[in-house]
Image: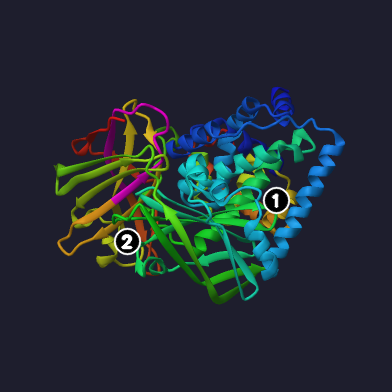
Amino acid sequence: MNDPERDQLIRQALVDEMHALPSIIREKMDDTYENLPNRRSVRRNRLVLQTAVLLVTLIICILSLGFISPVMANYLSNLPIIGSAFQSAGDIGLKQAGEELASTSTRQTITDKGVSITLDQVVYDGSRISIGFLHDSKVKFLDIDPRNIQISGSSVSSGYGLRNSEVAPGITATVLTTTVDQVLPNQFSLEIQIKHIQTWENDVKKDLKGDWSFKASVVKVLDGVIEKTFNPPLVKNLEGIKISLTEVAATPLTTRVSFDLVRPNDMEPEHIFAEKRSEGETTVQRELKFKLFDQQGKEISPLSVHGSASGDGIEHKIALFAPLGETQIQYLILRTYVITTPVKKSDSNAYVSVGQPAEKHLSDLDFVIPLIR
Amino acid sequence: MALILDIVKAKKGDKDAFERIIRTIEVVLYRTSKAFLQSDDDCADAMQETVFRAYRSINSLKESAYFKTWITRILINECKRIMHRNRNVVSFSDDYIAAVLDPELTKIELWDIIDRLDSSHKAVAILYYYVDLSIKEIAKELKVPEGTVKSRLHRARELVALQLQGQPERSDTV
């Protein structure tokens, strides 16, 4: 059999063998379809099209100048921009409601070492602080130390996640989201210091140290927020796993579930690193996963999980999920799963996956959480 | 023909037509993203951003017949962006990185073989066999010489054939 014949058979076999998507992809795509904005017809007359092209070119030129000139940067901070950081690089909650709930008068541009960074938007809903930046696409990484996100000199973050996306040619939005595990005032001044960035140009990485420090007045989102505290906590136990549910909160941006977790050592993914194994030896890595469902059984998209541990072996977990939207939700269901992944010790002190992870639902740990809106 | 008609409608701003097009190629997008990215979370992000970008810029597509190639190019760029981001940033949402496949997917055999190829061979094999890109187009997208694509494809073909020959139930097809 020659190559073209073999290629044709491989092609056909691949097509024949499909086709289901993993559930996480299925849900994300369904969310994507639901969130596609309405687009106007493209039938425009030539004059309108030419004017639009001219206008966009002009705006891009002005924006580009802003990144190399401090004077233009000042203008930049006062100009309306094509697309915001939240719209471009925000998660599903920020895309849906971040725009209108962001604290106003946030936009400011700082230039140092010839690089301008614009603080575009900040929002705080009691569960997380999200901060949107705009910068030159050559700036690939904003190295933000969590200790440098502060209120009145005290750090409010112990970890964060970053997302970025190109807003317009040459301009990138970066959105930083940090989970807040303390009660913050309804109005506060947030300080963010960036001391180090990385730029990439012509495949050359460059580290730049400088000072891009921002101060923003932030107003907590209060409208449409439902918080429910459980004191004493709701508790479930199973085979050494203990979950104590302390709080659930639904905001227009986020659904937050807070709980304390105690689990056996071998349920921690890092556990395998503490055990001695020779190269090539196989084992299984086990970890817990938490999913949230509404009363119709529809899974609510996960955003992040943040954890901190106290000396007594109790982990304080805050799991963030997508907002609940307009639907009348009477209760939520938190389900716990154990994920088992076969792994093999590789040549370094690392493990590689050697099979598909298996998921087991621990139904005895299900929580039905009342949530009347 | 239905696909072409939907592309024409999508260019005129028909959201439903656009959704229909994407639904027909979702699996292609997923498989392609999986050639570049490890976690399904990242694949989902890449696919979502690709769909938004394609939706916003579908009018820049000149030949409707090249829709699949066009959107694959957007997806590859998005995957590269995420790969770059992952080199720099450790997400705090590790709890969700482990992806779980639907039971149906675990039955796949030839895809299992493709998945076991190393990343450079996997990307070439998927773009060639599944997305139907030419060797020249793959070279352009991956920024490698055509000769490199040919040698990787040759190696991938050998590995796939070897694996398939080892499976009695597949021996009649190759």
Magenta range is A318-340
Q: Quadrant of the N terminus of chain A?
A: top right
Q: Residues within 10 Å of mark 1 (few under 14, many from 20)?
A: many
Residue occupying the point 43% across, 61% down = B90
What is the spatial separation of the Cα atoms under label 2 and label 1, in whole angstroms? Answer: 37 Å
Tag shown at residue A281? 2
- Would residue B27 be counted in the magenta stretch? no
Q: Name the amino acid type tagged 2.
A: Glu
Which residue carries the number 1 mark?
A: B138
Instruction: Read off the chain for label 2.
Output: A
Q: In the image, A354: left or right of A315?
A: right
- Please name whichever residue, A101 or B44, is drawn nearer the observer in this view of the structure: A101
Question: Residue A219 at what x, y percent from top left?
Answer: 42, 51
Residue occupying the point 65% across, 51% down = A81
- Please name whichever residue, A232 or A302, is drawn nearer the observer in this view of the structure: A232
- Would residue A336 be counted in the magenta stretch? yes
